[in-house]
Image (cartoon, rainbow, N blue to C red):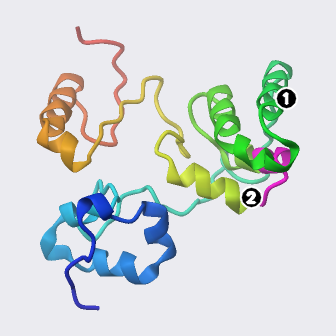
Amino acid sequence: MQCRKSKYWPSQAPTPLALTRSRQAWYALKDCSHLGSQALRIAGITSTGSSSDCGTAHAPHRDTEDNNADTPFDFTPENYERVHAILDRYPENYKTSAIIPLLDLAQRQHGGWLPLAAMNKVARIVDAKPIQVYEVATFYTMFNREKVGKYFIQLCGTTPCMICGSEEIKKTIEDHLGIKEGGASQLCCRC
């Protein structure tokens, strides 16, 4: 497919979810490699890699020993009380509205990341198809589908934040901690 100018201005850009549902729009933007990652950001996709690599936001799940559908996961008794309190906020026929707070609860219980088994548990609790829960978990950057460190630093990569200096902040953090983007540090503090 040849590159063509986007018909959207930044304020009219489709959401990432709309782009993933429209293959034509996704590939039209992805093939515009000469425009760089800015073209992807304008469309609402944050790219952490090259212009042809759309980062890990839409990376497929790969079963591992500690992250697969057969790995046991259940909420603690205290968190089951929270689950019931969360579900009580919504009408019976809108239980799927509780997906985000339940995923957050599962992630907090599981040490800052969200295993596949936890997403399946949330799907059973709200009577939803697992894919509906996976869509939410993969769409929002606040959900980590892989293990993260005790302190997890995220920086905004949108155009307004980059204009305001997010690249300099990123470089300062990398220099201070001695790591690169996506890396981990074993240091407690270098203050």
> Label 1's element?
helix
Amino acid type at image mark 1: His
List the residue tagged with mark 2.
130
Residue at the farthest bottom position: 1
Q: Quadrant of the C terminus?
A: top left
Residue 33 rendering spot, x and y as whole percentages = 19, 75
Crowding near pointer 1: few (<14 within 10 Å), some, many (20+)? few
Query: Residue 25, located in which quarter of the rendered image?
Result: bottom left
**Cα distance in 3D space between marks 2 and 1:** 20 Å
> Label 2's element?
helix
Q: Quadrant of the N terminus?
A: bottom left
Magenta span: 121-129
Query: Residue 152, located in which quarter of the rendered image?
Result: top left
List the residue tagged with mark 1.
84
Residue 76 rendering spot, x and y as whole percentages = 81, 24
Residue 127 left/right relative to 164: right
